[in-house]
């Protein structure tokens, strides 16, 4: 699908093309905007069969600039993944295709290339030096079980927002919204901007405290739609 247009209109065309194309059925996936921003897309797919990522559900973000496709997309996995060509700490993906992105490339192609990357890792260009060819599959499979295989029926939760009710020291409630797989520390930053920098807040999940280093996908969220945040001085 060659298109010589640029900017947001081209992004919308490509987005709609993907939504109506067979690509999503092929990878058992979906695509959505984040906060209705077409320059911030979230894609999910089921890990390729016969790989360490089989049965896992993986989410990654595509961030675009105003001059797309003149500037390359930024691709980051939101689901923690152990892969030779994906940075372990940040989820960043670095590929020749991305680095040489042009007006002849498309987001549809990009998604398929990211999907195929899981099935065909390149051990000659490691972004994760721990993922050596000899033994990476065992660790990749362990990460898959721990981080990407939490929801038995993932389709029920496609991009469903989680509501956070923030209760301040005086009992006043403020509501913010985050996305599935968003890091807790990122959600807290939103909360700080809304009600001020209160670093002593506790975030409660069914009576347990959520810690910044976790992501919401690490919890059993089958019936979750609300998280409460209380100042520590209230004792939860």
Image: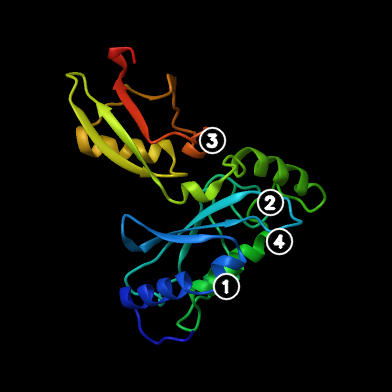
Residue 3 against residue 229 in the figure, above or below = below
Of marks 1 and 4, which one's residue comes earlier in the chain? Answer: 1
The answer for how far apart the CA atoms under marks 2 and 1 are is: 22 Å
Specify the quadrant that holds the C terminus: top left
Q: Nearer the viewer, residue 127 or 217?
A: 217
Of marks 3 and 4, which one's residue comes earlier in the chain? Answer: 4
Q: What element carries label 2?
A: loop
Of marks 3 and 2, which one's residue comes earlier in the chain? Answer: 2
**Pointers 3 and 2 in contact (CB under 8 A)?**
no
* Residue named by callout 4: 119
Mark nearer the viewer, 1 or 3: 3
Indicate which disc residue 97 carries. Answer: 1
* Residue named by callout 3: 218
Q: Is residue 141 visible?
A: yes
The answer for how far apart the CA atoms under marks 1 and 3 are is: 31 Å
Indicate which disc residue 53 carries. Answer: 2
The answer for how far apart the CA atoms under marks 3 and 4 are is: 24 Å
Question: Mark 4: few, some, or many residues within 10 Å (few <14, many ≥20)?
Answer: some
Q: Can residue 121 be seen in this view?
A: no
Question: Mark 2: few, some, or many residues within 10 Å (few <14, many ≥20)?
Answer: many
The answer for how far apart the CA atoms under marks 1 and 4 are is: 16 Å
Quadrant in the picture for residue 189: top left
């Amino acid at each position: 699908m060659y298109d010589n247009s640029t900017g947001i209109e081209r992004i919308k065309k490509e987005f709609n093309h993907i939504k109506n194309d067979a690509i999503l059925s092929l990878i058992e996936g979906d695509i959505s905007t984040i906060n209705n921003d077409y320059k911030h897309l979230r894609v999910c797919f089921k890990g390729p069969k016969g790989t360490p990522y089989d049965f896992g559900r993986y989410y990654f973000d595509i961030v675009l600039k105003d001059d797309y496709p003149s500037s390359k997309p930024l691709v980051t996995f939101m689901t923690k993944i152990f892969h030779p060509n994906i940075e372990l700490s940040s989820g960043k993906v670095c590929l020749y295709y991305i680095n040489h992105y042009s007006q002849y490339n498309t987001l549809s192609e990009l998604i398929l290339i990211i999907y195929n990357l899981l099935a065909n890792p390149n051990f000659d260009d490691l972004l994760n030096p721990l993922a050596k060819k000899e033994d990476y599959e065992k660790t990749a499979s362990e990460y898959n079980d721990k981080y990407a295989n939490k929801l038995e029926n993932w389709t029920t939760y496609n991009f469903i927002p989680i509501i956070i009710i923030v209760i301040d020291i005086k009992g006043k409630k403020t509501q913010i919204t985050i996305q599935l797989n968003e890091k807790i520390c990122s959600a807290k930053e939103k909360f700080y901007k809304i009600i001020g920098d209160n670093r002593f807040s506790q975030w409660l999940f069914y009576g347990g405290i959520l810690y910044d280093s976790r992501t919401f996908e690490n919890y059993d969220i089958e019936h979750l739609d609300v998280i409460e945040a209380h100042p520590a001085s209230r004792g939860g």
